[in-house]
Image: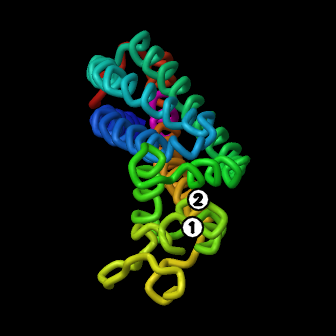
Amino acid sequence: MDCGIFTSKTVLLLLSLIFWAAGVALAYVGSYVISSYKTFDDFRVDSYTVIPAVIILVVAVVMVVVGIIGCCATLRESKVGLGFFLLIILLIFAAEVTAIVFGFIYSSKINGDLSKSMSEVFEKYNGENSETRAVDYLQSKLECCGVQNYTDWQSWPWFSSHNNSVPTSCCKANVTCTGQFNHPELLNTNGCRTKLEQFLENVLTYAMFVILGFAFVKFIGILCICMIICRSSRNDYQPLYS
């Protein structure tokens, strides 16, 4: 039994250290998700899809504090401290499960009215305004052109006012290209809507897998805490290493 308690304490000490590292890692993941969504905010991506990222950031802050509490409670075998540690882990575990649920819910809602909102932004493209910068960044980063495909530009003012051409951000990388519509072999002809949806879904999926991994670690921690508390309750005065 003592061997099991020793192992449980060792696991909990390691878990406390993991909490500190995980807090930093989750903070990075949450910030990455939010920044990825904010980058394309001009296209009115559903703001509710950042809810999982907000939960991740809150959990990250709490985990750093909890790691300190867990380390002290484990070393002293304090039932009160371990009980508090267990409660916090359960709350964090519940928050992570909630983030995972929200992630899967909103990953299916990313598309929403994205096509319509994107078309409105593309139509305002004039080479100088904020919509121009957003469109150029999107087309360059995702290597796409237009909303559905590059022919969409034919229906927007930029095309007719610039000698039947598309923006140079539609051009393929490492080629000499002026955006001429009659040279599609030099252009990224695929539309941006599908690629943007896929990019945002991939970001969210990445975050969900990270959360799932940390949730599993916390589940192991819950079992170890329960083992130590049960042992202490049965024999408060039995030496730990007999």
- The answer to which quarter of the image holds residue 19 is top left
Residue 172 relative to residue 64: left or right? right
Q: Give the range drawn in magenta.
A: 220-226
Query: Main SS of the magenta segment?
Result: helix
Q: In the figure, is residue 229 to the left or right of 156?
A: left
Q: Which of 143 and 64 is in front in this view?
A: 143
Can residue 78 be seen? yes
Q: Residue 224 occupies which quadrant of the picture?
A: top left
Q: Nearer the viewer, residue 194 or 203?
A: 194
Q: Is residue 223 magenta?
A: yes
Is 92 drawn above or below residue 81 in the view shown?
below
Disc 2 to disc 1: CB gap under 8 Å: yes
- Judged from the image, the secondary structure of the residue bearing numbered disc 1 is helix
**Which quadrant of the figure has residue 13?**
top left
Q: Which kind of residue does numbered mark 2 sit on?
A: Pro
Q: Give the residue displayed 55% in from the left and 67% down from the top.
A: 159
The numbered disc on residue 160 is 1
Q: In which quarter of the image is the C terminus?
A: top left
Q: Which of 6 and 14 is in front in this view?
A: 14
The percent coordinates of residue 167 (x first, y second) are 45, 67
Q: Mark 2 points at which residue?
A: 157
- Label 2 CA crowd tier, 10 Å (few <14, some 14–19, many 20+): some
Residue 44 spot, x, y in % from top left? 59, 41
User: Does residue 139 appear to the left or right of 153 in the view shown?
Assistant: left
Residue pictured at 54% horizontal, 74% vertical: 164
Instruction: Write the residue at 56% across / 29% down.
Output: 95
Between the C-alphas of marks 2 and 1, the distance is: 6 Å
Does 12 appear in magenta? no
The amino acid on which the numbered mark 1 sits, given as a three-letter code, is Ser
